[in-house]
Amino acid sequence: MTRAVASTTPRSCAASDLGPGDLGAEAVRRGRAGGLAAVGIAGAEAFTDVRAVLHQRRRAGLADAMQFTYRNPGRSTDPDRILPGARALVVGAWPYRRRDGSDGPEARPLRPRGQVARYARRDHYADLRAALVAVAGYLTGQGWRAVVVCDDNALVDRAAAHRAGLGWYGRNSLLLVPGLGSWCLLGSVVTDAPLVPTAPGGPAAPAAGCGACTRCLTACPTGALVAPGVLDARRCLAWLLQSPGTFPEEHRAALGGRLYGCDDCQTSCPVNRLADRRHPAPVPEPDSVAAVDLLALLGATDEDLLAAHGRWYVPARDPRYLRRNALVALGNLGDGDDPATEATLARVLAGDDPMLAEHAAWAARQLGRDDLVVAAPATGP
């Protein structure tokens, strides 16, 4: 995503005479007024300890081919690389828990439907970005420089939120915000305004943190949480659904009906479950998509797929990876005797894409339709 730049011009001599405390308090108020569930202020010093962790995990192979903040740890851990002269971070958490009203029981669908993780069901990042832009706009209106960083991998958002006192690191590797859990997206405003940190004594975490709880570690379908707070991306379903190439065969059955993202380490978390119970009844949002018809997806054109799901992270923006994911999910959810499923698998098996044909063959065998694989013409060179 492209950064929203509120201002990168030097501070003018007409800047407000508000003190750092008042300036920061108003910035926090503006963030909350924009819908942020939690807002905090932190210093903009480099995250040198996080940088060391990123390098170590990348060397150990735990990042797999993941880029994001791993691509350039020297950049993503130094706010001064975003805005030279940065002095403070205004960090916000946008809540996305149950905002689409789709988490209750539903009747068994007539056609197989792939599941979408909660955060991706609508463009919550647009909401987060709008709230942060309002904060940045206030700061620039007072004569300071400010840059919004949100979903663009320029900053270690979780570490910034931790430093700002928004929450504590959970064993599921996510930030747990009191009263909200990990059902939130994080972003920051990097500014040269001399704001006073809101948590100078440390993050707002309960003394026991996660206590003795390890439910997220055991709930992970592939054991990707190899230690408390340590994720092996090579086994993480959420990452594998976003990564290029073939979907690892050893993890296909564990994928179940997931099409994009995985929430298991969050739904198993007692902090999140408590937040769910305390949250008022959700209000359905018309543009929210919790599940996608797999057969319809596999029959859609490239243009239609990108129009419907282009805001998701799709490798090289190549829709064939959405089809790859759908084929694995279809193999886990589908009915081999269903004529529409049979026709879809036969069509992909007869197509000219060897990768998709291989995943269709796996799905057909999972559904007891080895005959479709035997009847299919050879693909590839």
Image: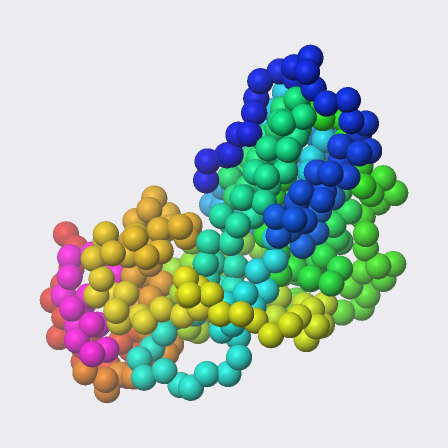
* Residue at left offset 29%, top offset 77%: 365
Q: Is residue 369 visible?
A: yes
Closer to the camera, 183 or 198?
198
Q: Is residue 144 above or below residue 363?
A: above
Q: Is residue 343 magenta?
A: yes
* Nearest the eye: 62 or 9: 9
Q: Is residue 134 above or below residue 177?
A: above
Q: Is residue 138 toward the left or the right of residue 195 in the image?
A: left
Residue interval drawn in magenta: 340-356
Q: Residue at x 77, y 39 (%)?
A: 25
**Magenta stretch, main secondary structure class:** helix
| Residue depicted at x 25% and y 56% | 304
Residue 253 in percent (x, y) is at: 43, 73
Residue 74 location (% of width, % of height):
61, 29
Q: Is residue 58 something one can see in this rendering?
A: no
- Answer with left or right where residue 337 lies relative to residue 114: left
Residue 276 falls inside the magenta stretch = no
